[in-house]
Image (tube, rainbow, N blue to C red):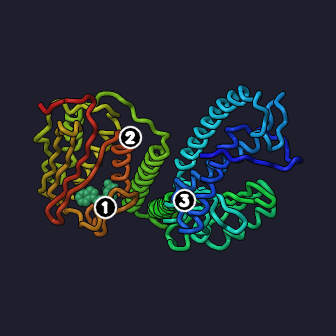
Amino acid sequence: MTTTRHGGPATAPARETGPAAAVLVPAALAIAAAAALAATFDGSMSPWLSGAASAAVGVAGALLARPARAGAPASRGSAPDAAPDAAPDDAAGFDERLVELRAMRLRDRERGALLDALADALVLVDAHGETRFANRAAETVLGEGASAAGTRRAVDALPPAVLRAVGGVLAGGVGASRRIECHRLDDESAPLVVLVVAIAAGDDAFAAIVARDVRAEREADRMKSEFVAKASHELRTPLASIRAYAEMLADGEIEDGVQRAECLATIQRETVRLSGLVDRMLDIQRIESGLSRAESAPVDLAALAAECVAEQRAAAEARRIALVLPRAVQGAVVQGDAGLLKQVLVNLVSNGVKYTPEGGRVEVEVDVDGLARTAVVSVRDTGIGIPEHARSRLFTPFYRVENHERFAKGTGLGLNLCRNIVERMHGGQIGVDSTVGAGSRFWFTVPMEQAGRKAA
Ligand code: ADP
């Protein structure tokens, strides 16, 4: 490349423009120009080119704006014409600037990588809405092609209010900002929160548009509202009957002693149900919010299953259900919280007993998957089974399969609590296989305490 001289006007501000600048400024500007041209011609500058353009503009700007070194003669755009005896100084200056340039490039690459690592779309636009720079996430958040510099694809992906906000903040001066809740024009299911901030004012004014896809947050909000609505409904039912019976007793409406005792028993039962419901809701809330911490100690799942089966046998026998533990391998030891894992087992076994007609069978199995290095616990019943459409919703709060109410009362929170304990607190998995009318197999896995344990 030949060195180009810059014969600036005599009144130009003092700048150090040695050979490095003489070579690199045009080079940098050339890259910027190439990038701009590419954008102008094909209208789809690739993200790397737009990055290169901003890097180039940054490098050129930094070199041109660099103040003169203290003690150095103030050049007025005529450094290349300097006297030959300035050569050693120029050579030293050249090296120095090469080092600076490398450092600048590195910083630029780092900044580019940082912006590309953001999950939010970041787009710099001018007053007309033309993109100057866009990070990688612009493509995912705003749609394909939205990162093309020199085009209006980013603002065109958004409602007109965003472009109006760009004009508004630029009129307001540097730092002025607006927040807009909207969605992509081509995708109503993609809710966005957009922040528009004025970055530079004057003739070369531009603004930053930061767009965040808030689909996950909206879904979480929706689920929370649903939880609150269902919880209120579930709490209202026992409360209503407690209130009704208490009022009847208070008004002296029930004179018969036996009936009064029945009323009191109902109140007691509903109160127990109510507090069980509240306890479960609090357990789930504590786990989901991370307030609950699982203990971490070796837990022998075979021993835990035997304990649980022994405790539940009476309830099973009362319904003439055979509750058995035919297979429990030695060495199914996991690192976890025995109390919580027992809660899972109790819930699955009691569900098996609840939803199996008299004369049926509930089997608990404890096994080890040596390959996956997990312990596997299954609770198999010969019960009523679960229709396919219900299986994916079974572990969500308050879900109960329609018509199952006639078999047993419940809260619809047990399986959700199980999933939280297994998956969130122990890093395992929980699932179900079922055939309507034939029975179900609920299973859960927990990673093994140590690698390489084998089934005995
Ligand atoms: P609950 O049993 O208190 O209603 P769960 O969360 O434990 O709450 O279970 C949710 C729903 O899943 C139950 O209402 C029932 O419809 C269904 N279910 C759970 N276990 C079984 C099972 N073993 N067989 C058939 N249905 C079951």
SS for callout 1:
loop
Mark 2: give few (<14), some (14-19) or many (20+) Cα within 10 Å.
many
Nearer the camera: disc 3 or disc 1: 3
**Which of the pair 178/38 is nearer the observer?**
38
Q: CA distance from mark 2 to mark 1?
A: 21 Å
Q: Position of residue 63 (x, y in %)?
A: 71, 42
Q: Which residue is mark 2?
A: 425
Dot 2 or dot 3: first in sequence order is 3
Q: Residue at x 21, y 42 (%)?
A: 376
53, 297: nearer the viewer? 53
Ligand 1 within 8 A of label 1's CB? no
Q: Which mark is residue 138?
A: 3
Pick the residue in front: 300 or 363.
300
The quarter of the displayed image where residue 452 is located? top left
Q: Is mark 2 within 8 Å of ligand 1?
A: no
Q: Secondary structure at mark 2?
A: helix
Q: Which residue is identified by label 1?
A: 392
Could you tell me residue 145's position as x and y percent? 51, 65
Which residue is rendered at x = 68% and y = 71% of the image? Answer: 161
Identify which residue is drawn at 26% across, 33% down.
448
Q: Is residue 72 left or right of residue 360?
A: right
